[in-house]
Amino acid sequence: KAGVTQTPRYLIKTRGQQVTLSCSPISGHRSVSWYQQTPGQGLQFLFEYFSETQRNKGNFPGRFSGRQFSNSRSEMNVSTLELGDSALYLCASSFQGPASEKLFFGSGTQLSVL
Amino acid sequence: KQEVTQIPAALSVPEGENLVLNCSFTDSAIYNLQWFRQDPGKGLTSLLLIQSSQREQTSGRLNASLDKSSGRSTLYIAASQPGDSATYLCAVPLGGATNKLIFGTGTLLAVQP
């Protein structure tokens, strides 16, 4: 069974641009959540989607948005990039999404904003 | 507000040693606690998930315990190996029907051959 797949693996953008990251969950998993990891702030929750609906959202500005498709694949978008958006963006999936399940993470997308 | 801290921030041990990593949380009303491992520049791998009703979970050389009343969890690694070198993170969910996890700051473990 394939794991969680994130593309692209690396991305370099300049300030003001926008970026779209993609996540394909494990087959059969319906919950997809996104996290931002930086050396200073650690791992911070961005949002969670379940059956194409946003179920939870973290404390990030509106420049960060996401969506989930009917096949459970998810994308996140960051508009008007800032230097502080440089981070490792991680996607995680689980079957249903209750807290009793293990989360399976992808390898992440390393975003560098110049 | 739930806060999760991990001590120590970094640990270096010789191969073969048994070691304990600590995780503390401020709100004891948790549904479960997960321990993850992260290799440099990679994603997280879930090691152990302890439900709130459990006291401990074991997987191979790993044993995790949970004491909700004191707000603490420990990850015990027996007979450490160089391949165990990684960052170890603990996390608790914010609520029962969500994957919104609050992560600790992590412990960077180096096992010297």
Image: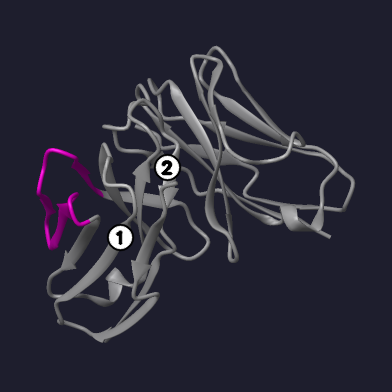
Q: Which residues are magenta?
A: B48-70
Q: Position of residue A85 (x, y in %)?
A: 73, 52
Residue at coordinates 24% horizontally, 55% vertically from top-left?
B71
**Residue type pointed to by label 1:** Ser
Residue A92 versus residue A16 in the image, above or below: above
Residue at coordinates 36% horizontally, 50% vertically from top-left?
B91
Our reading of the magenta stretch's main secondary structure is strand
Residue A2: which quarter of the image? top left
Residue A10 versus residue A32 in the image, above or below: below
Chain identifier of the residue bearing label 2 in the image: B
Q: Secondary structure at mark 2?
A: strand
Residue nearest the observer in this picture, A45 or B81: A45
Q: Secondary structure at mark 1?
A: strand
Disc 1: which residue: B24
Does the stretch in magenta take in B51?
yes
Disc 2: which residue: B101
**Residue type pointed to by label 2:** Leu
